Amino acid sequence: MKKTLTTVVLLLVTMAVFTSCNKFKTTESGLEYKFLEKNKKAPLVKMDDILEGEMIVTFEGDTLVNTFGDPKPFTRVEDDQFSGGHNEALLMMHEGDNAIFGIYADSIAQFLEPNQMPKAYVKGAGQRIYYNFHITHILTPEEIQELQEKDIAQMEARRQQLEQMKENEPNLIEEYVKTNNIKAKPTAKGLYVIVNKKGTGKKIADGDKVTVLYAGRFLNGVLFDTNIESVAQAEGRNSGHYAPFTITLGNHEVIPGWEEGLKGLNAGSKVTLLIPSDLAYGPGYGPIPPYSPLLFDIEIVSVNQ
């Protein structure tokens, strides 16, 4: 409770300063600045320093980022891509300083996609994004070396973990096939096409428009995606896209496991595809963990040229 109250008070104080832009000074580049605390006897930030600190970022009264209370290494000081940027701001600071800087939103927007800017942003309106930086520490060369070694160790541990997951995937598939008494044989690429109902409609070929209903699951049965509302509701999920899904086979609109698994099936068929990760999402994508074999229950609603 005490920490929460302190954060709220800090935000209120900071916002009060933000709304008093007439109290800010301005550099020749157009950067606004105001120091809340200055330690002139402490080391001055210089180019290539790695800084530990905390910050609050606001725009038009909204808090975009708030890391106060959790100081961490957060940036290396480099050349700015435009005049009046955050690196110019940081180079004005000493270790221990607490200051607020106003940077033109238009300057930042030119390097971002429109959807990456706050909704209240209006091009050409002269708006500023305000950064409250508190530099808690300038890392020494020894600390930088230690940080780099830690990062390398973490990357190596992650690499080994991914390698182990990849090596274990065939065992997971073999165990699933055995446990569920699957009689279908895998294709040369390791795909299992389990026909639950053989349709009598048109046979699928490259170039056909194929409309399907589907449910995607992990091997443990957990649903991760579906376009069937009743399936989603039964499992307490909400995918938000409950409509038949249409693809043009051969156009690489879906994962390779679908491309291979659907070809040659008839409209009206119901199948389960057991897809190894190299025909799916490989090292992972979104909610799909790395090297995850997947199950797709698919009903082929229609096939049209």
Image (cartoon, grey):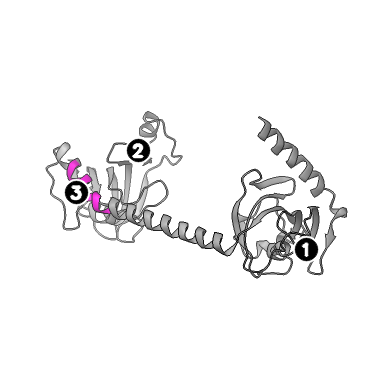
Say what secondary structure mark 3 lies in. Answer: strand
Which residue was labeled with disc 1? 31
Q: Percent x, y for residue 218?
A: 31, 41
Give the answer, above or below, for where 181 lies relative to 189: above
The label number, if any, that marks residue 192 in the structure image: 3
Which residue appears at 28% of the width and 52% of the height?
A: 164
Say what secondary structure mark 2 lies in. Answer: strand
Q: Please, what is the three-letter code of the amino acid marked with disc 2?
A: Leu
Q: Please, what is the three-letter code of the amino acid marked with disc 3?
A: Tyr
- Please give left or right for residue 157 compared with residue 264 in the image: right
Q: Earlier in the sequence, mark 1 or mark 3?
A: 1
| Image quarter of residue 30 | bottom right
Q: Percent x, y for residue 82?
A: 69, 69
Magenta stretch in the rendered image: 166-175
- Please give left or right for residue 218 compared with residue 55 in the image: left
**Mark 2 or 1, closer to the camera:** 1
Which residue appears at 22% of the width and 45% of the height?
A: 172
